[in-house]
Image (spheres, grey):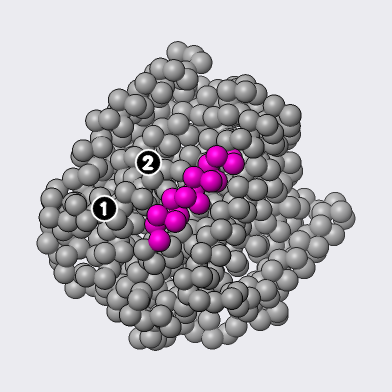
Amino acid sequence: MPTSARHATRQRAASDILMQVLVRIGNLALGVLVTALVVRTLGENGYGQWSTILVVLGLIGYFINFGMEEVAIREAARDPGSEHEWIGAVILLRLFALVPVVLVSVAAILVLHRSHQMLIAGLVLVIGMPFGGIGALGLLFQLRVDNRVPMLVLTLRSVLWAIAVAVIYWRGGSMIALAIAMAATNSLAAIVQLLAVFRLDTPWPRPSRKQLAPLIRVGLPVGIAGALVVAYARIDQVIVFVIAGTKPAGLYGSVYNVLDQGHFVPISILTTLSPVLAAAWPADRAKLLRTARLTAQLLAIASFGALAFAAVASGPVVRLVFGREFSHAASALPVLAGAFVLICFGYLNGNLLLVFGLQKRLLWISLVALVANIAGNLIAVPLAGFMGAAWITLATEAVVFLLTLRLILQTLEMRRPKVGRIGHTALAAIVLGGALEAIKLAGAPLGVLFAAFCFGYPALLFGLRAVVREDLGVLLRRGSPG
């Protein structure tokens, strides 16, 4: 049987993370191109409607999972022999939730639609929802710290979606055509993953009641907290759409899409390391701290560098990807990049609270964040438009980060976390930002800025010892203890 999370070596975890990051970077590059084509196909108003559909269905669709996957991962990582029972319980819950989620999704589309195209496109995407239930089987690969198949499925979906969007763009297609293509590619990718699970050497997970009661008991607070997180993270798009109109919603949705694409970084890292964290607590506190510290360092390297680049190059990036008519949206990108830093660490903090069994406390923190976010947006959007929504996003993420960090430190009986290499990483990002700004003032185009980032940031990380030679050796050695 492939290595389980409990026995995963440091080399195996590092290789799995690297593989995911490289694959997701390729998918991100393809996704940026596809987003540009979608924007040009639909225009400002059409893209505002399209992005709102995706946000609303994402909010409602969360209830198919309702945070139960995270609980199943934690319990299965601690007891690998029962993993098929936990995943079977997740599948059963998804089946129970499917009908009400579909009905609520249809009702939301009927209420919010602003055009015939928006209505039909939304209903087409709802039809594809049942295939999302197959995604629970991807947990089997995550528990084995071997995510090659999910990455293959992700790439297949991205390539098929890109081909479909390109054809629709060149033929002058519509929002309805895009919806049909998205539903079809998502469904096909889910079927491919289902076929891959048949080849695993493991008991086949079927809808099961055996672990259903404990899954609901433990997972309900997690699910409610997760729903609140999804709500406060995405409700701003809906508020901008309703209050400011379709054009500002299109501008905001375009740059927020960049933020969404960036989630591949914390997802890649935590997909690999969350089972390791769960398996280590409470028996091996030292391993949990080492793994959490490694996770934080990786998140800092990715998010600090992204913030430095976005702060300098937001204008050229937005014009290149979305076109000059979206130039006004560029001012929101650095603000959302700052929120992205806190979101990355939020992934780690939320995972640790779940590992510690503090999901009820996380629920209250998420509720406070949702109330503050809605109140802030209702005040800021009428005054400042989508820029108000961007600043409220940053403020909300800061509140969540501080509250969750305080709770984690209390649980671990630590006064404050060690800054360590994260401080060196911050310094590298600050120096990088200054260098990029100087290059930009000299009149350099976006290509030069990007090249300077790609070569300069790694050099600064090594020069300031945020990354050392031994870190690269982990990828080349075998059997290094976790």
Q: In terms of image quadrants, where is residue 215?
A: bottom left
Position of residue 75 relative to residue 328, above or below, is below
* Residue 412 position in % (x across, y down): 48, 75
> In this rendering, would 41 be left or right of 184?
right
Residue at the image point whose x is 34% and y is 45% from the top: 66
* Residue 127 position in % (x across, y down): 30, 28
Q: Quadrant of the N terminus?
A: bottom left
Residue 192 in view here:
no
For disc 1, the marked residue is 217
**Which label lies toward us, 2 or 1?**
1
Q: Amino acid at mark 2?
A: Tyr
Within the magenta stretch, is there residue 325?
no
Q: Quadrant of the C terminus?
A: bottom left
Q: Main secondary structure of the magenta part?
A: helix
* Residue 378 position in % (x across, y down): 63, 30
Position of residue 317 relative to residue 354, above or below, is above
For disc 2, the marked residue is 62
How far apart marks 2 and 1 lie (CA) works out to 18 Å
76, 183: nearer the viewer: 76
Number of numbered markers: 2
Q: In terms of image quadrants, where is residue 373?
A: top right
Secondary structure, mark 2, is helix
> In this rendering, would 224 be left or right of 73?
right
Circle 2: is it few (<14), some (14-19), or many (20+) Cα within 10 Å? some
Secondary structure, mark 1, is helix
Q: Amino acid at mark 1?
A: Arg
| Tags 2 and 1 touching, CB below 8 Å | no
Residue at the image point whose x is 45% and y is 31% from the top: 56
Q: What is the magenta range?
A: 358-373
